Amino acid sequence: MRAMLIDDSKLSLMHLQDLLEKEVGCIQVVGTFTDPLQAIEQARSLFPEVVFLDINMPDISGLEVGEQLQGLDHSPEIVFVTGYDEYAVDAFELNALDYIIKPVQLTRLKKTIDRLQKRITKAHEDVRRWKTSLFSIQCFRSLAFHIPNQEPNEIKWRTVKSRELFLYLLHNRNKMIDKESLIELLWHDCDENKGGTLLYTTIYLIRQTLKSHGLKTIEIKKSNMDRGYKLTIDSATIDVEEWEADIKNLPPLSHSSIDVYEKVLAMYAGDYLGEYDYLWAEYERERLCRMWLQLAKKMSRFYLEQGRVLEATMVNERVQLLYPLEEDSYMILMQLYASLDNNTAVKNQYKLLTTRWEQELNSLPSIYITEWYEAWKKETDKRNFPNRD
């Protein structure tokens, strides 16, 4: 197993190298560095599988070095080494493979190596599994990763900020986003130095999380001169992109194509990132919502024109389920239920409409709906009780 050691103390490097090569035995130390920037550059050609990295170094934090190492094409596992417990806790929170307190003890080091071997074996298996199948990223309703013939893989993010940063980069995929914009978005109440440190830490955590789930075809790349980040995806599809492409490629609506329309309508499983209250996603969420509603209303009109009452009812019920404040669905459903002489369903729809409008909007339904309902109710009462007057 190939290892790289980074520490500003030469004595610490020598001690750790001796333990790894002479006592542990399964480790090949391919480089030792007191200059972390030189180590980052050399890692591009040395391809270490693990880097033992001191956290508390002058000029540059070990946390930032770890983040930069994770940005390499062949990103290594990171084991943080520190002389202070407070930094060990920070390293653990970063989801590093492990952390070791100085002076390094052989018994503790062997436990780290055992953990490292298990993680590398699992990572190789995950990579083979994901590369053999084209996986899909779900963005409708919530984030999940789908691979054929397996259950959806919903990542448990270590922090709320890491999830939002990943989703923001995914939302702006293939675009370089400058660091200042990311800090302003997520840590606007921090000063520049602290915000920068939090950004480095969170990028590192995201890369570790993706790596631990075998998602190596999703990469977060850093720009030249360390000015920003860009997320790229290889060998994967995104449900939102696929759905919008299907919408644009729909044939003219007819008896022969209606089944295709139904499939596209059903693909919309909920609002874009609907479970997360991100203001930056609101425009896209609303745009996709309007596209879906336009499709649903088009299909509803088609079914109504064809006298297909059941299908028209199902489309409008679906609209009402996803968007309970879409007023037209109540009107159409009342008319459909009336055509079926389902008086109870008509009344329930009107009651549901008035209740929701009062609770959610502190308002009354549109006048034309109320007038229609009152006229229908009067006519129904006249038929059912012809001698009432």
Image (cartoon, rainbow, N blue to C red):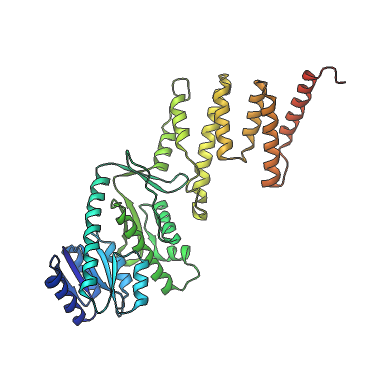
Residue drawn at the location 48% of the way across and 25% of the way down: 253
Q: Nearer the viewer, residue 271 or 49?
A: 49
Q: Position of residue 100 (x, y in %)?
A: 28, 73
Q: Position of residue 15 (x, y in %)?
A: 17, 78
Left or right: 330 in relation to 93: right
Q: Nearer the viewer, residue 357 or 348?
A: 348
Q: Is residue 178 visible?
A: yes
Left or right: 148 in relation to 18: right
Residue closest to the far right: 389
Count of all numbered marks drawn on residues in the image? 0
Up-down: is 60 above or below 299? below
Up-down: is 173 above or below 364? below
Query: Which quarter shows the C terminus?
Result: top right
Query: Which quarter shows the N terminus?
Result: bottom left
Q: Quadrant of residue 309?
A: top right
Q: Is residue 76 visible?
A: no
Q: Position of residue 177 (x, y in %)?
A: 39, 59
Q: Quadrant of residue 66?
A: bottom left
Q: Nearer the viewer, residue 306 or 100?
A: 100
Residue closest to the far front: 107
Q: Quadrant of residue 60?
A: bottom left
Left or right: 49 in relation to 365: left
Q: Position of residue 334 (x, y in %)?
A: 66, 28
Residue drawn at the location 39% of the way across and 39% of the way down: 242
